[in-house]
Image (tube, rainbow, N blue to C red):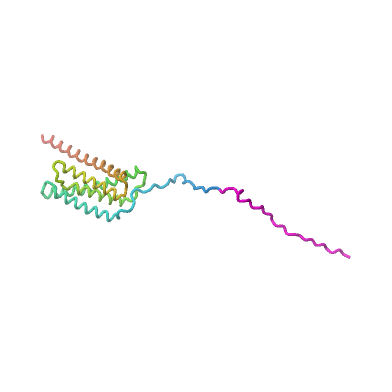
Amino acid sequence: MADEPSTYNVSEEKPQTEPAAPAGDRAPSAPAITPAPAAGFPEVAPEFVLPGRGSPAVVFWLGAILLVGACTAAGINYPARQFVPVAGRVVFTTYDVLLHTVTGVVAVGIAAWLQEQRFGRVDLAVARVFMAYSAFALIANVNVPIPYVGTLVGFALAALAYWALILVLFDKDKLVGTMIAGVHFVIWASVALGTQLGVWVQASAQAVGAK
């Protein structure tokens, strides 16, 4: 009789896994590495002129009011009482404020460069310097009733008001505020000296021609 086929119990083979290592034997995880900035893309410097202390429009209109006061004081306190000289003094005061608003913005840019910062908001810088220098012009054109030193005292008070407004409007510490005011003073003095030198040269030429 035919032999019955024999049956074999074939057990399923299961993949063998290595036992988990104890907690103390595990390799420490690598620390996270922060990628360095790519070459040619340095970190962005902070801005020097930041928002705050009033919008450009508000600061500008306050400066315009101070400019009107400066022109009024310049006209009232001008020694000549004729219309043309007084009007000329008013026009010169307006021109002086506008000119040194520009030189003041240049001074802010130099201060930002010295601080290794980006300039920031140009409109804010223009409005702030305009207001500060308009206050300077207003006080400088007011006659201080002190014999011999009245003009010097008035100039000192005007410079102090300008410096204080620079500190408040730009929200800087005294060192940086003094830096802005100092650089602006150097530019202002250079322009004034050049103007006076031109007047002196012209007067000397006229004196020589009259002889």
Q: Is residue 134 magenta?
A: no
Residue 53 in the image: x percent, y percent? 30, 53
What is the residue that sits farthest to the bottom in this orientation? 1
Residue 129 in the image: x percent, y percent? 27, 49
Count the marks: how many? 0
- Does residue 127 sit above or below 191 in this rendering? below
Query: In this rendering, would 144 be left or right of 113?
Result: left
- Does residue 63 sit above or below 153 in this rendering? below
Query: In this rendering, would 30 be left or right of 83?
Result: right
Residue at figure coordinates x 13%, y 42% from the top left: 147
Residue 83 in the image: x percent, y percent? 12, 50
Q: Is residue 12 magenta?
A: yes
Q: Which residues are magenta?
A: 1-29
Nearer to us in this view, 139 or 203: 139
The quarter of the rendered structure image containing the N terminus is bottom right
What is the residue that sits farthest to the right in this orientation? 1
Nearer to us in this view, 148 or 115: 148
Residue 161 in the image: x percent, y percent? 24, 47
